[in-house]
Amino acid sequence: MKLRSLRLETQPQLMIIPMIDIIFFLLVFFMMSTLYMVEQHTIPVNLPQAFAARQDKPQSVAVTITQDGRVLFDQEEIPLNLIAGRVDAELGRDMDSTFVLRADQEVEYGKVIAVLDELKNAGARKVLVATEWKAR
């Protein structure tokens, strides 16, 4: 009686190349699908163009002046005289907060300077002015 013949002579082989292909495909699929899930939470304004434009940091606080002159602090409309209180609250949470001033290009220059002055008087040390990148 031959007992050896009842057992398998060769061990099953694990094919790793197809598994790597599937894992790579899943990685690419999830990377591409997450690109469409990103939302930008800012008020749309028509920004002026500049050659030295850069992207703002994600940890920044947006201060927006719309075309009709309304001031929005992180998408909440506030009067000009209440900006100092909001800046103090943001600086209380993080002293290195960056404030990004986003003004429509049709807004009066005096309105932009008034908001910038309120930010600086409230103690904001890092204030950026948002522009769009202009191709040469």
Image (tube, rainbow, N blue to C red):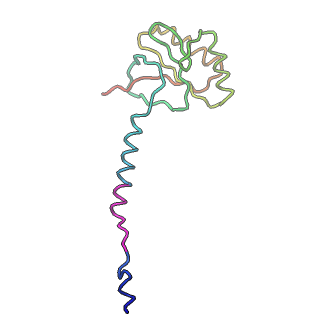
Frontmost residue, 55 versus 74 = 74
Whether the magenta-drawn stretch holds residue 21 is answered as yes
Identified at 47% across, 16% down, the residue is 103
Q: Residue furthest front?
A: 1
Magenta extent = 12-22
Asked if 82 appears above or below 126 in the picture, the reply is above
In depth, the one of 12 and 87 nearer the eye is 12
Give percent across and percent down for residue 28. Answer: 36, 47
Quarter of the image for residue 9 reads bottom left
Q: How many marks?
A: 0
Residue placed furthest toward the bottom: 1
* Quarter of the rendering occupied by the N terminus: bottom left
Q: Residue at x 39, y 88 (%)?
A: 3
Front-most of 127 and 3? 3
In this picture, residue 16 sits left or right of residue 116: left
Query: What is the x, y in percent for residue 72?
Result: 54, 15
| Residue 3 in the image: above or below residue 95 | below
Horizontal and vertical percent position of residue 42: 48, 22
Of residues 53 and 47, the one drawn nearer to the viewer in this rendering: 47
Q: Position of residue 59 (x, y in %)?
A: 55, 32
Q: Is residue 114 magenta?
A: no
Residue shown at 53% from the left, 18% from the top: 75
Magenta span main SS: helix
Q: Residue furthest left?
A: 136
For the C terminus, give its image quadrant.
top left
Residue at 61% x, 19% y is 120
